[in-house]
């Protein structure tokens, strides 16, 4: 079997930006990329990549991970479209993949609705259906009431399905952006303009995509010794590095200083739009069940999954927005408009674990509780200037600059590489086969299967 070409490896790395490949496996692809190029690696880079790739699935005897290597994808409307084609026989054939495309689904619903005299969005079964006279006037005299009602109900259900699909697709994008910033939006040509840049982006994105671990300490940082070694290669030949692509995922002052102002402005506009999108998700979760702001501990009825995904995405977008704003010299905007950070919800058992180990609530929780809600600030309903944030930070003895409340996040220091753990609902398990068994048995899931699962422990 011939060795993959440089372009094939770059395509594989680019595809990984929207997946959840283990960093070890991405490191192995990067090794192959440099081998295909015939590139000479410095000792530090070669050692760092070898340390990570040693544990790639290709190098492990079982070659298996129990964790999905993709972000959960929403179930499309292909089944409903197939049913529509059987009831509305005059509908044109839809292309493969139409069930995942909201625009095509909506167009199909509208066209089918027109054929039975139904306007899009008119879903009231008692008021919006046509009676016999209305059906005859619409040229549906040969369609029985039963057949008409069957078509009306299908279109009503399809509109509800479309709304759910759009919401779930938005949640998936929010999750990916919260983990890996705008990596998944990078076009291939920009990503592959420089293989060294592509290698760094793919690896740091894989690190960012790692799942959270059940712990009472800090989560693992994305920037590790492998990322540092790859970044040193970019520092060594800045004239070839694609700094604009880097700015999508790694907005340090060193990177942003090399990006043209017009590209920075485009990124600023993109992050501004994304902040508004995430603020809508946060507000929706809040309105369905307001949270305990003073503690941010999960209570019954809280949609912690949606909130935590949106909170992480908000904080990622906010960090990029702040970094670009400062690089453009526009930080004076914060004097009038300085939206705060959003904390994640914490499970009660983790909060108890914190207290028992001598800890407590993170000081940022108290600051968040006193600041206006983000969506209120974005809509201009409440003011949140830098002076207010500084005053609240001072009340809780929190440095607003070091804490990234009024300034970009400090540049991360490289941490040591550690293997990606097999996780079962956030709990690390040594063996992937055991992890699969534990997950199937319901261990750590809180779903009442502990008795059956005890056989595995």
Image (cartoon, rainbow, N blue to C red):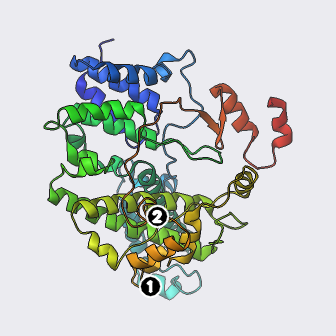
Please rate how many residues cluster around mark 2, counting C-alpha atoms within 10 Å: few if below 14, some from 14 to 19, many from 20.
few
Total marks placed:
2
User: Quarter holding the N terminus?
Assistant: top left
Q: Secondary structure at mark 1?
A: loop
From this viewpoint, which residue is outermost toward the right?
451
How far from the left and from the top, in percent, is residue 217? Answer: 61, 47
Q: For the point 36% across and 25% down, which residue is it?
A: 29
- Disc 1 designates what residue? 382
The alpha-carbon separation of the residues under discs 1 and 2 comes to 23 Å
Nearer to me, 184 or 353: 353
How far from the left and from the top, in percent, is residue 205? Answer: 39, 41
Residue 119 in view (yes/no): no
Position above or below: 159 against 217: below
Side of 263 where 116 appears, left or right: right
Side of 160 where 385 appears, left or right: left
Side of 360 where 406 appears, left or right: left
- Disc 2 designates what residue? 399
Please rate how many residues cluster around mark 1, counting C-alpha atoms within 10 Å: few if below 14, some from 14 to 19, many from 20.
some
Please give the label number shown on residue 128.
none
Of labels 1 and 2, earlier in sequence is 1
Residue 451 in view (yes/no): yes
Q: For the point 64% across and 61% down, which residue is it?
A: 361
Position above or below: 337 against 308: below
User: Quarter holding the C terminus?
Assistant: top right
């Amino acid at each position: 079997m011939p060795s993959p070409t440089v372009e094939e490896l770059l395509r594989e790395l680019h595809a990984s930006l929207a997946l959840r490949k283990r960093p070890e496996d991405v490191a192995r692809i990067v090794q192959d990329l440099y081998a295909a190029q015939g590139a000479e690696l410095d000792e530090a880079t070669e050692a760092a990549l070898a340390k990570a790739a040693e544990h790639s699935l290709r190098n492990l005897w079982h070659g298996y991970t129990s964790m999905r290597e993709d972000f959960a994808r929403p179930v499309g409307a292909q089944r409903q479209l197939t049913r529509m084609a059987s009831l509305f026989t005059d509908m044109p054939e839809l292309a493969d993949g139409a069930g995942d495309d909201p625009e095509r689904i909506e167009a199909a619903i509208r066209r089918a609705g027109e054929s039975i005299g139904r306007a899009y969005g008119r879903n009231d079964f008692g008021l919006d259906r046509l009676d016999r006279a209305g059906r005859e006037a619409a040229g549906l005299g040969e369609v029985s009431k039963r057949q008409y009602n069957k078509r009306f109900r299908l279109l009503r259900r399809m509109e509800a399905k479309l709304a759910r699909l759009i919401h779930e697709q938005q949640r998936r994008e929010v999750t990916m952006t919260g983990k890996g910033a705008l990596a998944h939006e990078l076009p291939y040509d920009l990503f592959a303009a420089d293989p060294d840049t592509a290698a760094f982006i793919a690896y740091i994105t894989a690190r960012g995509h790692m799942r959270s671990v059940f712990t009472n300490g800090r989560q693992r940082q994305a920037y590790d010794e492998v990322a540092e070694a790859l970044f040193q290669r970019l520092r060594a030949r800045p004239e070839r590095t694609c700094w604009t692509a880097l700015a999508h995922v790694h907005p340090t002052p060193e990177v942003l200083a090399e990006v043209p102002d017009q590209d920075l402005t485009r990124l600023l506009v993109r992050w501004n739009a994304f902040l508004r999108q995430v603020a809508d998700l946060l507000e929706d979760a809040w309105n369905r069940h307001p949270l305990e702001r003073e503690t941010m501990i999960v209570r019954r009825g809280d949609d912690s999954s949606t909130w935590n995904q949106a909170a992480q995405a908000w904080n990622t977008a906010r960090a990029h927005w702040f970094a670009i704003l400062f690089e453009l010299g526009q930080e004076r905007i914060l004097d009038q408009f300085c939206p705060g950070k959003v904390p994640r919800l914490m499970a009660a058992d983790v909060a108890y674990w914190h207290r028992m180990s001598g800890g407590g609530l993170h000081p940022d929780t108290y600051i968040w509780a006193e600041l206006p809600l983000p969506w209120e600030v974005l809509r201009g309903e409440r003011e949140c200037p830098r002076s207010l944030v500084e005053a609240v930070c001072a009340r809780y003895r929190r440095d607003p600059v070091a804490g990234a409340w009024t300034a970009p996040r400090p540049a991360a220091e490289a941490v040591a590489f550690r293997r990606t753990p097999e996780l079962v609902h956030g709990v690390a398990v040594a063996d992937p086969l055991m992890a699969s068994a534990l997950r199937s048995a319901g261990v750590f899931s809180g779903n009442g299967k502990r008795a059956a699962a005890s056989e595995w422990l």
